[in-house]
């Protein structure tokens, strides 16, 4: 059922956060069997691929992004046999499988670190001024007085990519998962790995807290040498049949810097986080869309679009309500390129803002008071007690019963059915997926684009209904339209000319 080696160019990819997606064994933690049991749901939703956040052996100091064994499944998620069965069943439904790869750092429980193989990590006699993204210094001292680097939690020591053993290990890890049938990789902290020669100070002690995204070049991110790694990886991907791909999570200082990660000799895609960070306003969206499409032109590859993920507040809350979230989603799905969805956004889930502090597990919360746990609350499947979970690892709000997949399944106006309908149209309509767009004249609070052949997309971000002279058939709208055809505020509509 899987053809087309260029599938990734216009794919809709659904991010599964395994711990919070579906629990097959009733222990309160989602698992691979749970994902496998919900493949029909994902097929009915209409996605082309799933991206699995880390399921590897891990102490879970950072939700699995602290990997102790890159070639095995943590028992909380299942076994390698469960993974193989999931891939086979997904492929049988025409769904490809992308897995997370975490090359910047390992767990401090990785055999290399436990064995004291310091040449495979970044150790030095004196720390510099670098800070952890999660807060506090990026260095921890060991018993003999040396210090090791961790740009994230202390339990996540940075690997030394100047060591050829590290490079060889990850080439082998790529082959291990490609041999098991994975269709691609999402590269975590893809702008990391290489640090500036000599590890110079970054001037941070008196400056702002270190961030993943900034306007300035820093000595620990986006160094030119990182591209040598991807030029080693690309021939491996290309040596496997079926269009194997890789997408970068790269937070860099400019579109030109981001474009360097993508190309025929490096990675296939890079996440476009600027769209996720845009304000809900026509001008903000247009600025980001134009900039992103120009950036894509630089490398001859399609851009990616994303509104929510496991690291940022859900866009229902971030954009100020469900109506805006639905409108932003229809805009995103109409843009040229590929779209990435985050599990639960198709149910219209908001960010959970009132989790008790003692239940939060995000190391960023423990170190600097900022928590990503609110977007990682398990998603509701049923409307009955437990919402499809038994003692979930994070509590699910009781009011989510009305947002459950079961509650929305047969409601034609539900957010779930909006996603299903939009993805169905996207798959069938010749104007959607790849291609280009044309901007149409519109009021300042309204975006209007045309996708050839014959599809017009209008988003009204203003406070008043928008009346545009656009005759044609309404294919889908994110909310009810006025009787006179006007487009209400916070609404997107697709019109077939």
Image: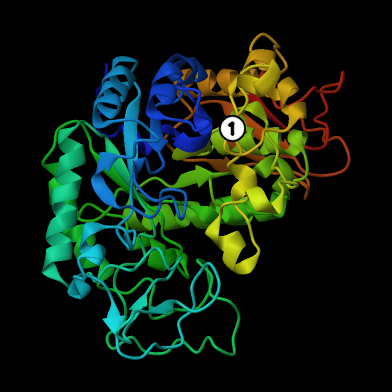
Instruction: From the viewer's side, name the closer residue of 277 and 110.
Output: 110
Q: Quadrant of the C terminus?
A: top right
Residue at (36, 58) in percent of width and height: 298
Viewed as shown, does residue 312 lie left or right of 433?
Answer: right
Instruction: Say whether residue 16 is visible.
Output: no
Instruction: From the viewer's side, name the closer residue of 234 and 85.
Output: 85
Q: Residue 387: x percent and y percent?
A: 65, 21
Q: Residue 176: x percent and y percent?
A: 16, 41
Identify residue for label 1: 392
Quadrant of residue 309 within the rendered picture: top right
So how many labels did they put on this image?
A: 1
Quadrant of residue 468 within the rendered picture: top right
Q: Residue 3: x percent and y percent?
A: 24, 23
Could you classify mark 1 by the number of other residues whose Cα lies within 10 Å: few (under 14), some (14-19), or many (20 or more)? many
Viewed as shown, does residue 70 lie left or right of 403?
Answer: left
Q: Is residue 207 above or below residue 151?
A: below
Q: Residue 257: x percent and y percent?
A: 39, 68
Instruction: Say whether residue 109 is visible.
Output: yes
Viewed as shown, does residue 274 lie left or right of 10?
Answer: right
């Amino acid at each position: 059922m899987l053809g087309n080696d260029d599938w990734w160019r216009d794919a809709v990819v659904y991010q599964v956060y395994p711990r919070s997606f579906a629990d097959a064994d009733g222990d309160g933690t989602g698992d691979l069997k749970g994902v496998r049991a919900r493949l029909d749901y994902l097929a009915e939703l209409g996605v082309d691929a799933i991206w699995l956040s880390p399921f590897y052996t891990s102490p879970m100091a950072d939700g699995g992004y602290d990997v102790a064994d890159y070639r095995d499944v943590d028992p909380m998620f299942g076994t390698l046999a469960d993974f193989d069965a999931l891939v086979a069943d997904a492929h049988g439904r025409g769904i490809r499988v992308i897995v997370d790869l975490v090359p910047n750092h390992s767990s401090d429980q990785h055999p290399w670190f436990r064995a004291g193989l310091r040449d495979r990590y970044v150790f030095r006699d004196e720390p510099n001024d670098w800070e952890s993204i999660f807060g506090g210094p990026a260095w921890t001292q060991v018993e003999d007085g040396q210090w090791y680097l961790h740009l994230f939690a202390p339990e996540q020591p940075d690997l030394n990519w100047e060591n050829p053993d590290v490079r060889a290990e990850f080439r082998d890890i790529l082959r291990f998962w490609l041999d098991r049938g994975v269709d691609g990789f999402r590269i975590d902290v893809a702008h990391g790995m290489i640090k500036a020669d000599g590890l110079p100070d970054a001037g941070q002690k008196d400056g702002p807290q270190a961030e993943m995204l900034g306007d300035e070049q820093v000595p620990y991110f986006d160094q030119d040498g990182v591209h040598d790694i991807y030029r080693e990886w690309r021939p491996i991907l290309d040596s496997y049949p079926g269009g194997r791909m890789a997408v970068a999570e790269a937070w860099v200082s400019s579109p030109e810097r981001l474009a360097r990660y993508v190309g025929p000799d490096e990675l296939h895609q890079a996440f476009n986080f600027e769209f996720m960070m845009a304000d809900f306003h026509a001008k903000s969206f247009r600025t980001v869309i134009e900039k992103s499409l120009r950036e894509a032109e630089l490398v001859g590859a399609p851009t990616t679009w994303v509104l929510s993920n496991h690291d940022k507040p859900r866009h229902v809350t971030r954009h100020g309500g469900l109506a805006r979230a639905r409108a932003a989603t229809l805009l995103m799905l109409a843009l040229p390129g590929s779209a990435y969805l985050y599990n639960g956004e198709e149910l219209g889930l908001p960010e959970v803002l009132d989790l008790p502090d003692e239940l939060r597990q995000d190391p960023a919360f423990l170190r600097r008071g900022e928590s990503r746990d609110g977007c990682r609350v398990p998603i509701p499947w049923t409307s009955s007690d437990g919402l499809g979970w038994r003692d979930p690892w994070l509590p699910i709000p009781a009011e989510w019963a009305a947002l459950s997949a079961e509650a929305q399944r047969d409601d034609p106006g539900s957010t779930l059915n909006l996603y299903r309908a939009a993805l169905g149209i996207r798959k069938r309509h010749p104007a959607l997926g790849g291609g280009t767009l044309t901007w149409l004249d519109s009021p300042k609070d309204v975006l209007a684009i045309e996708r050839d052949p014959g599809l017009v997309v209008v988003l009204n971000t203003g406070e008043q209904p928008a009346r545009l002279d656009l005759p044609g058939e309404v294919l889908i709208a994110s909310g009810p339209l006025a009787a006179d055809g006007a487009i209400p505020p916070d609404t997107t509509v697709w019109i077939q000319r």
